[in-house]
Amino acid sequence: MSELPKQAGILSATEFFRLAVKAVVGISLARLLTPAELGSYRQLFLIYTTFSTLLLLGIPQSMLYFLPKAENPEKQNALISRCLNIISMLGLVFALCLLIFRGVIATLFHNPALGKLLIIYALYPAFLFVTQFFSSVMLGLKQPLKAATFTIFSVTADFILIVGSALLTRNLNIIVCGVIISAFLQWLYARISLSQFRAKGTYFDLSSFKALMSYSLPLGLSSIIGMLSVQLDKLMIAGFFTPEKYAVFSIGATEFPVVGILSNSITSVLLPHLSSSDPEKMGVLYSGAVRKNTILVFPLMALCYIFAEPAITLIYGKLYTESAIYFKIYLFLLPLRIATYGILFQAFGKTRVVMYNSLFLLISNAILNYLLIIKFGMKGAAMATVIVTWLSVIIYLILIAKVLKLNLRAFFPLGKIAKNAILTIICAFFCMLIIKLGKSTIPFMLAGGVVFMIAYLFLGKKTGVILDYDIQLLKGIFTDTFNRLKK
């Protein structure tokens, strides 16, 4: 098995573990807290996720670009040391902002409980900024196993401290304290690990700093704009509706996380290699990743749509059944996730294009969100996000052809994508037919799911959608990951 799929496999396997633990944490809190308390808890992370992207200035992502280009270990160490100092300072700035503006935030979210919670939670960015930087450094150095090991440590600490405190106390203040203790342990792990990269003699290189900022600032701005675009519906729901309503919306209004994990893992592994290798090989690497993504994305979208309502009700309880409609709307983003479009502009150093596209996404999403929320309520927010994201991707494809002058067919195997989509629709039809014949009873729903998977694998193999290489690759990833874990 080649090194790139192996590295992506390590990251994906680790992220699947993180997803499973995160899901257990979310389900536990939904069962143990009231909807209002769950809404407050989720609003804390909405605040962090949204504004941390702004204050990080794109520095962690820039490590994937600059570390592979560093001429020797000394320059790598100098770059890491300088950026670590900047990241630590920015984390403290964010912490102070949360403390100072906690009352304003609570008022904007119509949630007085947030004011007290933010006093505890303010420490979170001071710790988490460094941990995010550590993971990017490991990936930039092409050491995904170290990044994966850190992820396992992080999610284990979160699980023990968050779920443990929830089970013992069911007190939201104590649960947030558990979040902070876990963040501190992760920060300690990252700081100790990064100490090996300390530069000999701290110095400030103006030219290097300008090059870093020239690359990272547009990327950072595009990231915050992109993040605001993604989170905008949740921010507006938090502003328009109660914490209870926000809890229901936030559970459903999310993309299926497995797909994001796969795309992020492949992007994180591809970018350092695209940035440091012959650009002519980009088409082969990129189109191969796109084809493999469709094998996961298309059947997952179909199954999630079919089983959304019973699955959410079973997992979260009847209080959150309404979340299924928002989840179904968000599923229409999944076909776009077979590729990561901004990576091509990052590889060519044209991060401003990513920024401008993200700015379009934010402005149009804000306008459409407001109009559709007024017209359709909470469903309108989800609809607006999906519509605008599709427009953004269409613009990306046009720019890839016009600005980068790349042949889209070389990067996107349209025939293979269409064949897979048709196969998925056929299998979904058989699945829904069985469920309908059984009047949506549990045995027939399970039978429908099994028939879908068997039909997809069998017909996929016969039609060439699934190749022998894919099966061998999957086996190799599992075997390699298992052997590494045994060591």
Image (cartoon, rainbow, N blue to C red):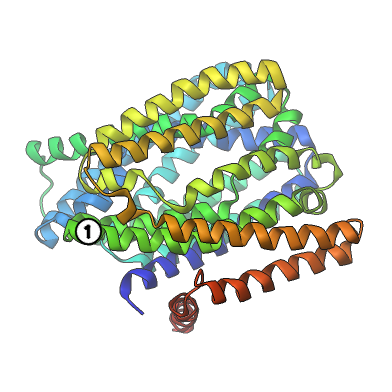
Q: How many marks?
A: 1
Q: Residue at x 60, y 22 (%)?
A: 236
Q: Residue at x 55, y 22 (%)?
A: 102
- Relative placement, left or right, of 43 versus 243 is left
- Density class for disc 1 (Cα within 10 Å; few <14, some 14-19, many ≥20) is some
Quadrant assignment, res 103: top right
> Residue 61 location, x and y as percent?
31, 46
Query: Is residue 24 visible from the viewing direction of this image?
Result: no
- Relative placement, left or right, of 232 versus 160 is left
> Residue 180 location, x and y as percent?
55, 45
* Quadrant that contains the N terminus: bottom left
Query: Is residue 184 visible from the viewing direction of this image?
Result: yes
Which residue in the structure is indicated by mark 1? Answer: 197
Q: Residue at x 18, y 40 (%)?
A: 212
| Closer-to-camera residue (54/80) | 54
| Closer-to-camera residue (348/241) | 348
